[in-house]
Image (cartoon, helix red, strand yellow):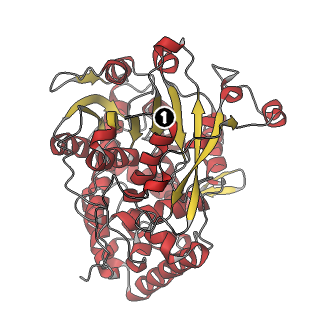
C-alpha cells in the first residue's frame, strides 16, 4: 500500500526559530463584557469565575521556518491565582485534548474542578491551538460530506463493503480534503500539526512571563506535552500527561488500538453493570454480547424517537461510546439500556437521557471535526490507498466486536491530505525534569497500554494508574488521583514506581 509522502520532521534550532516572536507581553482584558456577564448563568460552585477571566493573544508565525511570512493570533485565557502573592507559582497551562478542543471556550463554560490549593497557587491558563476556536479557527465547507457514506457502511462487515461504496467513500473524502484546502490554503493545513502547536506553546509560555512551563495535558494534550519536553526540555518545570495518546505506528494502527481500548472499556462497563448497577439488562458476562446485539438489532428495526429524531443502532453506539468517557455516567447507561430492553422507550428517564444526547449532536460540530481531522492527518504517516483503510476497518472489527471498525473509515480524508511536516515519534525527552503520566485502566479513548508505553518511553516519567474507567482521571473528583497530581504540580513530588489509585465505582 502506498504511503502519503510527507515533508518529514526537520528540527529547527528551537532557540533561534522565530526569535523575533519572543518577548511579547499579553494585553489582558475581561473575556466577557458586562452585558455578556449579566446574560450568563452564574457558574456553579463559583459565581464570580467568569467575571475574573482575562483574555489576550500571542502572535505566532504560521510557518515557524518562515517567521517573516503570515502570522496568526493565538487566543489565551487566564484565571488569576486567588491566594496571597507569596503563594503564587506562576502559570499552570491546560490543554483539554481533541485535537480541536478550544481552551478559551472551556474556561468560559465554568470553573475548572481543581483544588483550592491549585487555584490559590497558579494562574490557571489555557489557549486555543492554531486552527481552533479564536486562533484562526476554521470550518471545512464539506466537513459533513462523509456522514452519508459512513452511515451506509455503519454496521456492515468491512470485507463486505463493495467497490461502489469504496469509490463513494474515497470520492467524498477527497471532497472534504479539497474543501479544507480551499478554505484556509494548503500551507495552513501543512502547518496544523502538533510540532507547530508546541512551538506556539513555547511562545505562549514566554509571553506569560514563566521561565519554565507547568502544564496539564489531557488525551491529545499528552502528545503536546511530551513533544514539548522533547523540544524544550530546558523550558520545562512540570508536565502532567493524563490519558496518553500514542503516535508511533501510523494512523490506522493507532486507530485499531483505540478500537481495542473501547472494547475493553465496554467490557469493564458490562462487569460493573452486572455486579453493581441497580438496573442492568444483561444476565451474565457470557450472555452479554448476544444480549447487547439483540438490543441494538431491536433499536435498528424500531428506532427510538426523541425530539423528532430517530435513534437507531448507529446513534446508540455513538452514545454508548461517548458515555464510557465519564465513569459516573455508567449507572445511568445501565438504567437506560435496562429500560429500553424492558420495552418502555417513552419512559421519562429514557426520553430525557436520549434528549440530552440529541441536543448535543445538534451543536455545530463542523469546526471541531475540521481541526480534529487536520491535526490527525498532519501528525501521522498515512496510507494513500482506500484498501488500506478497509483492511484497517477489518482489523478494528476483529478487536472490537461491539463497536466494529466504522471509526477507521472516518480517517479517509487523510489519504488525500496535503504534504505536512510529520511530527516526530520515539520521544524520550532525556533532559527533561521528572514528568508524571496518568493512565486509566479502562479508558475508552486512549488505551491504558498507551500510558504505560509513554511512561516507559520518556526517560524521566513516572506512571500513576487509576484502577477505574472513564477518559482521563485528574480533576474529575477522584481524591486519590487529585492528591498525587497536586503534590507533583505544587512541590515536584512524584509517586513511587507502580503507584495506583483505586477505582471509585
Q: Quadrant of the C terminus?
A: top left
- Position of 351 with respect to 197 (left or right) is right
Q: Quadrant of the N terminus?
A: bottom left
Question: Which of 489 and 480 lies nearest the eye of the viewer?
Answer: 489
Picture coordinates of residue 427 (x, y %)?
A: 21, 51
Using the image, determine if residue 342 lies above or below residue 224. Answer: above
Q: Is residue 18 visible?
A: yes
User: Residue at (55%, 68%) from the top-left corner?
Assistant: 70
Q: Is residue 342 visible?
A: no
Secondary structure of the residue carrying tag 1 is loop
Look at mark 1 in the image and give the residue it sits on.
209
Picture coordinates of residue 335 (x, y %)?
A: 50, 33
Question: Which of 168 and 53 lies nearest the eye of the viewer?
Answer: 53
- Position of 344 with respect to 200 (left or right) is right
Picture coordinates of residue 151 (x, y %)?
A: 51, 69
Instruction: Give the number of callouts.
Output: 1
Report crowding for label 1: few under 14, some 14 to 19, many 20 or more residues within 10 A (C-alpha): some
Using the image, determine if residue 143 lies above or below residue 308. Answer: below
Question: Which of 495 and 277 lies nearest the eye of the viewer?
Answer: 495
Picture coordinates of residue 331 (x, y %)?
A: 46, 30
Amino acid at each position: 500500500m502506498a504511503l502519503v509522502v510527507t515533508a518529514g520532521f526537520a528540527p529547527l534550532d528551537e532557540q533561534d526559530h522565530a526569535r523575533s516572536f519572543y518577548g511579547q507581553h499579553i494585553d489582558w482584558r475581561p473575556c466577557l463584557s458586562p452585558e455578556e456577564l449579566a446574560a450568563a448563568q452564574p457558574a456553579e460552585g463559583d459565581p464570580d469565575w467568569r467575571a475574573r477571566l482575562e483574555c489576550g493573544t500571542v502572535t505566532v508565525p504560521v510557518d515557524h521556518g518562515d517567521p517573516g511570512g503570515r502570522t496568526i493570533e493565538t487566543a489565551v485565557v487566564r484565571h488569576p491565582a486567588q491566594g496571597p502573592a507569596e503563594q503564587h507559582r506562576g502559570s499552570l497551562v491546560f490543554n483539554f485534548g481533541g485535537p480541536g478542543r478550544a481552551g478559551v471556550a472551556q474556561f468560559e463554560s465554568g470553573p475548572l474542578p481543581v483544588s483550592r490549593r491549585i487555584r490559590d497557587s497558579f494562574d490557571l491558563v489555557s489557549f486555543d491551538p492554531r486552527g481552533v476556536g479564536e486562533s484562526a479557527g476554521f470550518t471545512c465547507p464539506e466537513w459533513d460530506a462523509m456522514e452519508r457514506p459512513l452511515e451506509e457502511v455503519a454496521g456492515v462487515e468491512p470485507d463486505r463493503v463493495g467497490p461502489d461504496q469504496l469509490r463513494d467513500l474515497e470520492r467524498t473524502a477527497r471532497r472534504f480534503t479539497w474543501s479544507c484546502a480551499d478554505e484556509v490554503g494548503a500551507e495552513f493545513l501543512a502547518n496544523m500539526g502538533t510540532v507547530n502547536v508546541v512551538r506556539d506553546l513555547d511562545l505562549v509560555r514566554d509571553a506569560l512571563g514563566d521561565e519554565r512551563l507547568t502544564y496539564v495535558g489531557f488525551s491529545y494534550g499528552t502528545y503536546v506535552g511530551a513533544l514539548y519536553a522533547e523540544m524544550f526540555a530546558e523550558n520545562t518545570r512540570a508536565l502532567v500527561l493524563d490519558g496518553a495518546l500514542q503516535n508511533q505506528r501510523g494512523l490506522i494502527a493507532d486507530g485499531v488500538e483505540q478500537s481495542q481500548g473501547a472494547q475493553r472499556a465496554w467490557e469493564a462497563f458490562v462487569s460493573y453493570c452486572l455486579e453493581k448497577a441497580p438496573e442492568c439488562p444483561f444476565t451474565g458476562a457470557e450472555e452479554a454480547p448476544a444480549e447487547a446485539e439483540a438490543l441494538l438489532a431491536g433499536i435498528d428495526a424500531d428506532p427510538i424517537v426523541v425530539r423528532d429524531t430517530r435513534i437507531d443502532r448507529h446513534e446508540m453506539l455513538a452514545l454508548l461510546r461517548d458515555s464510557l468517557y465519564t465513569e459516573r455516567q455508567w449507572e445511568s447507561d445501565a438504567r437506560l439500556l435496562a429500560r429500553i430492553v424492558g420495552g418502555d422507550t417513552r419512559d421519562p428517564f429514557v426520553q430525557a437521557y436520549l434528549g440530552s444526547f440529541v441536543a448535543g449532536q445538534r451543536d455545530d460540530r463542523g469546526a471541531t471535526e475540521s481541526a480534529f481531522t487536520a491535526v490527525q492527518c498532519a501528525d501521522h504517516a498515512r496510507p494513500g490507498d482506500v484498501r488500506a483503510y478497509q483492511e484497517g476497518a477489518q482489523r478494528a472489527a476483529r478487536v472490537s466486536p461491539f463497536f466494529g471498525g466504522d471509526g477507521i473509515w472516518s480517517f479517509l480524508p487523510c489519504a488525500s491530505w496535503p504534504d505536512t511536516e510529520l511530527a516526530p515519534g520515539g520521544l524520550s525527552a532525556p533532559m527533561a525534569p521528572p514528568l508524571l503520566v496518568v493512565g486509566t485502566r479502562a479508558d475508552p479513548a486512549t488505551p491504558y497500554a498507551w500510558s504505560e508505553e509513554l511512561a516507559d518511553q520518556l526517560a524521566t516519567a513516572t506512571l500513576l494508574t487509576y484502577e477505574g474507567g472513564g477518559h482521563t482521571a485528574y480533576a474529575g473528583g477522584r481524591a486519590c488521583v487529585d492528591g498525587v497530581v497536586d503534590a507533583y504540580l505544587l512541590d515536584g513530588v512524584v509517586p513511587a514506581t507502580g503507584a495506583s489509585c483505586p477505582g471509585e465505582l
